Every structure is written in structure tokens, then in C-alpha cells.
């Protein structure tokens, strides 16, 4: 069974705290929507935005699934406004909380990539009734997600990035050479899968240098907190998907194996399930077909 997908509108907008925030809605071309809608939360990084999910959306509908998909740009990313502020997971969770209440207005399955699960965790606390279940794709090492980073350290890092040095670093970090090198070293299991679509999308997304504020907020570690009690309080069904070559940028997570990472999350979650797939840290892009096949039974 195959279907193509259309976007209801190339880009739609809503206003949150006087900021213009972008999103798009995907649905089957026959408008025969079935199942619970998905809410996608993209990763934050140089040039990253909701475009991260385009390959996943194509595969989802070409495989024949018909769930409506909401794909928003976080503030500071993509086509959303990019104010010069330090962003925290709570800020982005407040943005999506408003989005759920005013735009979506029905329960969703949250699909979140990487360390941005910190946003999903905060969002569950704020709006449990509009969340049906969650999928953590390539979550961080357990030692990273359960360790509080000192506030002074976060602020020091932010002040360093938010300077002429940071501006110069960002301009270098958005070059294809750096993006290919970083993706090969830290994100993909094989350099062969760092394709032209990936690099072209990142380069285009990084043209607006105001994207650096979201990137620097992430690199400064404002998301680094001890989430263990909040994860344990999640009562919703949660699927954890880990790559068989999953790695960690953080020093404290380098010794952890993918099996250990999966076991730690499942031991903490009240209704957790886990899957290990071929790939490393960006499974929805790197191993798209396998990822879709793996999460579809959970969503059904």
C-alpha cells in the first residue's frame, strides 16, 4: 500500500508571546486521515529545523500510513522568529504547549529527536491530556540526561558563545566542510549516509545567522538537567529507539553501550518499550525506512 503526501499549506504561522512561529501540516493526498496525529520535535543545531523531518514524512506516507503530522519550527529555528535570547527547554515547551492548545487541539503522539526530549519531558508536565504517547528517537546517554549542569557553567558558556568569537565560530560551523565532518564524526554511523540532501538543508537553514542563538543555547547546556524524576513520572506509553552504534558527545556517556542506554530508560519509564536499530544518532534520517517500520506498530 502506497500513498504520497501533501502539505496543507507550505508554511503556516501562529503568534506566541508576540513571536511569529512557523509550522506545517502533512496529511495523505487522499485526505483519508487515520489514527492519532503525530507532533514532531526537531533537533537543534547549525541549520537544523523542521526540515529534519521531511525524509521521515515522505517515507511514512509512501509506506501507506495515514496519520496527520504536525511539524513545527521551534523559536530560533527555520522560519520561526529568531530573537536574541538564551533558550531553555522550558521556553520551547511553553511554545509547543500553546501550539497544542490553540492549533492542534487534540491528543498527539510526540516524536522527538535526541536531546530535545528535554522539551517533550517538560511538555508532558504542562499538557498531559493532549499527549497520547511518546517516541524518543536517539535519546542522550542516561548519564547525561540525569546529571545537573551548574547554572554558572551554562551562563559562562553562553557569554562565551554570545560574543564575536561565537559569531565567527558559527560562520565557520555552517560551511559544508565542517557540517560533513561533524555529521560523520558525531551523528551518522557511516559517512556514506551523509548525503547531499542533508548538507544542502543544513547550509540553507544556517544562512540566517540569527539561528546561532538557538544553537548556542543548546551548546551552552541549558537543557542539561537531572530529568530522572520527571521521566519516572511519565505515565504515557513511551517507545525508546536507540541506534546499535549510538554514541555520546558528553564525556560522562562515552562508556555506555546502546544496550545499557536502552535498559536505563526502560527501567525508569512506567510504560516504556525499547527497540534497537541499525544506525547511530539520527535514526529518523539515517535509517528512515527501518525507523518507520519499527515505530509503526507502536503508533498503531
Image (spheres, rainbow, N blue to C red):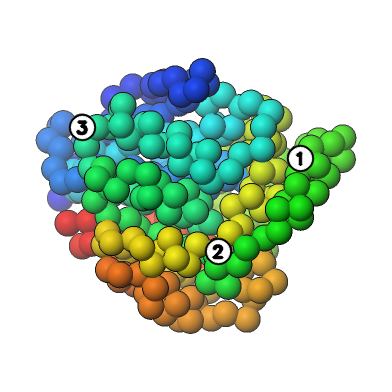
Q: Which mark is residue 170?
A: 1
Tag nearer the camera, 1 or 3: 1
Mark 3 lies on residue: 29
**Disc 3 or 2, which lies upstream in sequence?**
3
Q: Secondary structure at mark 1?
A: helix
Q: Which mark is residue 226?
A: 2
Question: Which quarter of the figure is the C terminus placed in?
Answer: bottom left
**Can you see residue 117?**
yes
Judge by depth and name the residue closer to the eye, 298 or 244: 298
**Can you see residue 276?**
no
Q: Position of residue 299 (x, y in %)?
A: 22, 56
Residue that appears at 55% across and 63% down: 226
Side of 86 where 166 appears, left or right: right
Q: CA distance from mark 1 to mark 3?
A: 39 Å
Looking at the image, is 111 positioned above or below residue 264?
above
Estimate how packed mark 2 is, as few (under 14), some (14 to 19) or many (20 or more) residues with alpha carbons within 10 Å. Answer: some
Q: Residue furthest right?
A: 164
**Disc 1 or 2, which lies upstream in sequence?**
1
Side of 211 where 236 appears, left or right: left
Residue that appears at 61% across and 39% down: 87
Q: Secondary structure at mark 2?
A: loop
Q: Position of residue 282 (x, y in %)?
A: 50, 58
Q: Which mark is residue 101?
A: none
Estimate how packed mark 1 is, as few (under 14), some (14 to 19) or many (20 or more) residues with alpha carbons within 10 Å. Answer: many
Estimate how packed mark 3 is, as few (under 14), some (14 to 19) or many (20 or more) residues with alpha carbons within 10 Å. Answer: some
Residue that appears at 12% across and 35% down: 32
Looking at the image, is 265 positioned above or below residue 168?
below
Amino acid at each position: 500500500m502506497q500513498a504520497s503526501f501533501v502539505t496543507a499549506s507550505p508554511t503556516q504561522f501562529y503568534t506566541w508571546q508576540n513571536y511569529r512561529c512557523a509550522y506545517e501540516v502533512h496529511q495523505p493526498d487522499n485526505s483519508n486521515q487515520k489514527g492519532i496525529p503525530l507532533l514532531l520535535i526537531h533537533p537543534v543545531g547549525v541549520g537544523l529545523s523542521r526540515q529534519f523531518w521531511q525524509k521521515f514524512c515522505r517515507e511514512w506516507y509512501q509506506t501507506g500510513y495515514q496519520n496527520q503530522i504536525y511539524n513545527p519550527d521551534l523559536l530560533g529555528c527555520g522560519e520561526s522568529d529568531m530573537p536574541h535570547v538564551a533558550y531553555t527547554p522550558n521556553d520551547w515547551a511553553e511554545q509547543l504547549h500553546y501550539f497544542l492548545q490553540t492549533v492542534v487541539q487534540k491528543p498527539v503522539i510526540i516524536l522527538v529527536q535526541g536531546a530535545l526530549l528535554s522539551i517533550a519531558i517538560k511538555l508532558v508536565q504542562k499538557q498531559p491530556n493532549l499527549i497520547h504517547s511518546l517516541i524518543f528517537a536517539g535519546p542522550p546517554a542516561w548519564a547525561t540526561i540525569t546529571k545537573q549542569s551548574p547554572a554558572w557553567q551554562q551562563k559562562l558558556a553562553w557569554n562565551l558563545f554570545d560574543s564575536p568569537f561565537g559569531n565567527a565560530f558559527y560562520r565557520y560551523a555552517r560551511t559544508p566542510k565542517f557540517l560533513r565532518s561533524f555529521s560523520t564524526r558525531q551523528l551518522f554511523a557511516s559517512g556514506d549516509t551523509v548525503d547531499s540532501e542533508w548538507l544542502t538543508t543544513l547550509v540553507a537553514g544556517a544562512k540566517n545567522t540569527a539561528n546561532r542563538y538557538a544553537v548556542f543555547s543548546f551548546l551552552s547546556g541549558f537543557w542539561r538537567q537531572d530529568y530522572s524524576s520527571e521521566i519516572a513520572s511519565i505515565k504515557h506509553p513511551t517507545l525508546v529507539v536507540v541506534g546499535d552504534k549510538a554514541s555520546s558527545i558528553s564525556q560522562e556517556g562515552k562508556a555506555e553501550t546502546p544496550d545499557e542506554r536502552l535498559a536505563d530508560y526502560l527501567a525508569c519509564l512506567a510504560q516504556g518499550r525499547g527497540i534497537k536499530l541499525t544506525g547511530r544518532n539520527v535514526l529518523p534520517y539515517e535509517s528512515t525506512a527501518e525507523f518507520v517500520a519499527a515505530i509503526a506498530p507502536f503508533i498503531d
